[in-house]
Amino acid sequence: MSKSKVIALLLLSLLAVSCGQKKGTSSVKLKLFQSSITTGADLSGGILLMGRSEDGLNSFRTSLGSVSESLSMDLAKGRWEFAAIGWAGVNGPMTGDNRCAYTGFVDLKDTESSVTFNLSQSRCLTDFNGNQFSDSNYLTSAGKFLEFFPVMCNVNTVGDPGCIYTSNPTSIMSYKITYKPEVKGLVTGSVKPFASNCLILGSALRARIPVTSDIGGSPLKVSLSFFKNSNCIGNPDLNYDFNNGIANNQLPIWNQVAPLSTYYSYLYLNPGIQYDLAEANPVGFSLDSAGINSAGTPAFMSNQVHYTLPALPANVSEVCFTLESSCPSNKWIPIALLTGNLMLDGVVADGNYSLKLYYKTVAQVVSSTFTEAAFVVDSTPLSPPVLTTTPSVTLSSANVTWSASDSSMFAFWKVYVCSDPSCSSVIGYKQINDFNIKYATFTGGEITGGLTLGQNYCIMVKGFDLFNRTSQTAPVCVISTN
C-alpha cells in the first residue's frame, strides 16, 4: 500500500472539559476538524464513524459527509475504541474505493489527547476487536468491498427465471442504503444517518458496502429501503433492517446473499406477492349446467350460470368473468366473494355465448390472455308437439305419430295411453330419447288390462327439455276397433 493510499484522521483536542459530574462520570469532548486530515486519497463518499467504550455501556455510530465536515461529541471518560470506513465517492456516498481504520483502545483521560486513524484499503481485510469490516467472501484480495447488487425475485430459488440478476419481476424500482445513527449510554452530541443516493435496481451505478454477519456484535448494521418509484420519493414501500448483518440474517421474507467472483455481492430478495409483477394467466374452468345440449355445450335457462374454477395461483386476488373482449373495471370479483354462481347482464336473448375468465394479481397485474367456456341460454320450453294424425287403437295395437321442430334443449319424449280424457289415469307409456323418432306403437301387453274392443283410450305426447320443462299435446281420445 503506497503512502498516498493512507489517510490519517486525527481526532484532535480530546479535551477534558470541566463540566462537573454527569451522572457521576466525567466527560471529554471529541472534536474532528478539517485540519486534522492529512493529504492523500479523497473521501468525498462519506465516512462512517463508530465508537464504543471498553465496558460496552456507551457507544455511538454517526457519519461525516466528507473530510471537510467537523464533529463534536461528549463521551464518557475512560477507554474507548473507534472504527471508521471511508469512501472515495466517485458517484456519491458509499461509492468508489473504500478504506478502513481501527484505533484499538484509547484512554480518554488526559487533558489534551489525540487519536489517529490510519485509513487504508488493506485494513478492511482485518478485524476490529473480533468484528469483521466485511466477510472475506465479499471483498477483493486488496480489501475493496464488492459492489452491492440487490436482486428482486418472485420465487425462492436463485437461478430460477424469477430470481436472476438480469431481470426484475417485481414493482420495486429503486432503493437506498442507510446506516442509522446510534447513541447508547453517556454520549451526547449530534449523530447523523449515513445514506446512499437513490439507486436504481439493475442499473450500473451501485454502492460498495461491507457484507457482515453479527458475530461479536458488529456495529455495521445496515438498513435497506425500497421504493416502487424510480427516484426514492415518499415513504419507502419496504424497509429491511439487517440487525444481524447481511450475511447472517433471516428477514421476515425470503432472502439469500451470494458473492460473484470479485465483482458483486448479490442480495436476492423475494418481497412477497404484493410486489410480484408476473402475470397469472388462467387455465380452463368449467360451467356446471343441468344438462348438455346436442352439441355438447353446457346449457342454462337464464342468465344465471354456475361455474367451477381450478385451484387459483397464490398471487391471484381477483377474477373477472365477462362476455366482452376485455374485462370492464366493474366486473372484478375478489376471490373471497366467489360463490360459484354468476349473473350475466350481457345475456339479453336466447342463444350461444362464450364466457371469458381473466385473473388479477395482488400487485394488480391483469392477465394478458384469457380462457373461455361456451354455453347456451334457452329461457323457453320446447315448442309443443303436434299430433299429425288421429291415433288408432285396435285390439292388437295403439299407434301414435306427431311432429315437432324445436330440438335445441330436447331431452326425451313421453307417450301416454290413458283411460280418461284428462289423462290422470295412465295405463301405459313409453319414453323415447331420440328427437327424430316421433312415432310410438303399443301392443296389448304394454297396456294395463290389455286392449279391449270398444274401449275409450286417450293418447297424449309430452316433450321434456334439459331443465325438465315440458310441453305437450292435448289428450286425444278414440274408441278401439277391430
Image (spheres, rainbow, N blue to C red):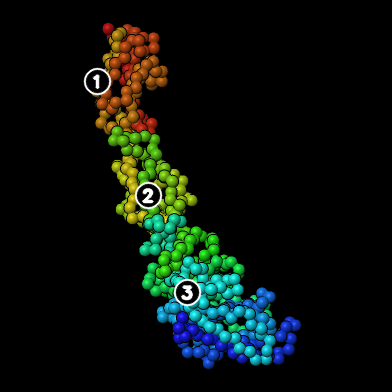
Q: Mark 2–mark 3 contact, CB under 8 Å?
A: no
Q: Which residue shows up at 41% across the image and 69% down it? A: 263
Q: CA distance from mark 1 to mark 3?
A: 106 Å
Q: Earlier in the sequence, mark 2 or mark 3?
A: 3
**Quadrant of the image occupied by residue 364:** bottom left
- Circle 1 residue: 389
Give the side of residue 93 with respect to residue 76, left or right: left
SS at circle 1 = loop
Height in image: 386 above or below 254? above
Q: Give SS at disc 2.
A: loop
* First of labels 1, 3 by sequence position: 3
Q: Is residue 86 visible?
A: no
Q: Position of residue 159 (x, y in %)?
A: 40, 57
Q: Mark 2 or mark 1: which comes first in sequence?
A: 2
Please report contact status of discs 2 and 1: CB closer than 8 Å, yes or no.
no
How would you rate the neighbour count of disc 3 (Cα within 10 Å): few for under 14, some for 14-19, many for 20 or more?
many
- Residue assigned mark 2: 282
How many angstroms separate mark 2 from mark 1 (CA)?
55 Å
Q: Amino acid at mark 2?
A: Pro
Q: Nearer the viewer, residue 415 or 262?
A: 262
Instruction: Name the residue located 60 percent from the left edge and 68 percent from the top edge.
Output: 216
- Comparing labels 1 and 3, the label whose residue is closer to the camera: 3
Are circles 1 and 3 on residues that touch, CB within 8 Å?
A: no
